[in-house]
């Protein structure tokens, strides 16, 4: 390589030209590795960058984004941006865990889906004006309207409605709701 007062160059290795930046350059198929204490800490090649902890791969860039192995700890807000903004857990044993003790859990077990409050308090579901619970195909099951009625449905048809001083049933036979 060449050495002078403003530039140090080693072919295909390090270039520093006096400005604040230092550049690492390699032929297209070579890999750059930063090794400390006898194990990989960082590596990069023409396709990706890799970060290691105690020699084990923990983070990798990919054409679609990144791959993380292990836990992501954050002291701030994690914001999801991009085309769809979705957060996916693509296993039937994975859970979205919320709260300091992970006492609010949202998950799917392969057959059924759950919202589970495993803590000591109540589970509140709030809506700006009404709450509607529907079946998979959009059939009404329950409507709860703020400062208004609660409607229970059977086969998408209202069967029981509450009012300010009464409860109404769609049909009665001999005092039995049907």
Image (cartoon, grey):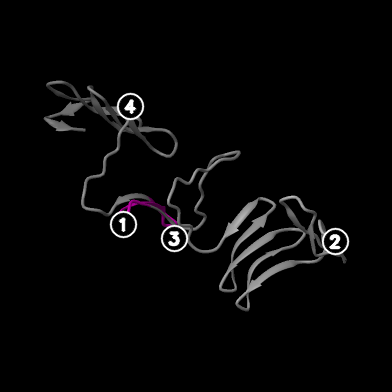
N-terminal of the pair, mark 4 or mark 3, is 3
Query: Which mark identifies residue 101?
Result: 1
Residue holding disc 2? 4
Q: Earlier in the sequence, mark 2 or mark 4?
A: 2
Mark toward the viewer: 1 or 4: 1
Q: Secondary structure at mark 1?
A: loop
On the image, the x and y values in percent for residue 122 come to 22, 45
Element type at marker 4? Answer: loop
What's the CA distance linking mark 2 and mark 4? 70 Å
Tell me: residue 14, above or below residue 119.
below
CB within 8 Å, label 3 to label 1: no
Q: Earlier in the sequence, mark 3 or mark 1?
A: 3
Residue 152 lies within the magenta run: no
Q: Residue at x 61, y 54 (%)?
A: 66
Badge 1: how crowded within 10 Å, few (<14), some, or many (20+)? few
Q: Kindly report the distance in space between the C-alpha atoms of the residues bearing marks 1 and 4.
A: 28 Å
Q: N-terminal of the two: label 2 or label 1?
A: 2
Q: Which callout, 2 or 1, points to the residue nearer the camera?
A: 2
* Mark 2–mark 1 distance (CA, rounded to whole Å): 59 Å
- Label 3 vs label 2: CA separation? 60 Å
| Between discs 3 and 2, the one toward the N terminus | 2
Residue located at (12% from left, 21% from top): 165
Q: Which residues are magenta?
A: 98-113
**Which mark lies nearer to you, 2 or 4?**
2
The residue beneath circle 3 is 93
Relative side of 169 to 77, left or right: left
The residue carrying mark 4 is 128
Circles 2 and 1, Cβ within 8 Å, touching? The answer is no
């Amino acid at each position: 390589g060449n050495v002078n007062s403003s530039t140090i160059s080693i072919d295909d290795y390090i270039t520093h030209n006096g400005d604040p930046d230092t550049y690492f350059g390699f032929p297209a198929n070579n890999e750059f590795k930063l090794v400390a204490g006898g194990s990989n800490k960082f590596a990069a090649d023409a396709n990706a960058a890799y970060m290691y902890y105690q020699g084990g791969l923990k983070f990798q860039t990919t054409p679609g984004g990144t791959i993380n192995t292990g836990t992501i700890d954050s002291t701030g807000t994690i914001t999801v941006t991009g085309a769809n903004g979705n957060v996916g857990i693509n296993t039937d044993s994975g859970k979205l865990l919320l709260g300091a003790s992970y006492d609010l859990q949202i998950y799917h077990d392969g057959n059924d889906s759950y919202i589970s409050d495993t803590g000591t308090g109540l589970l509140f579901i709030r809506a700006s004006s009404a709450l509607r619970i529907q079946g998979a195909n959009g059939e009404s099951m329950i409507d709860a309207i703020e400062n208004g009625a609660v409607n229970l449905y059977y086969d998408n048809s209202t069967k029981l409605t509450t009012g300010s001083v009464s409860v109404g049933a769609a049909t009665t036979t001999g005092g039995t709701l049907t």
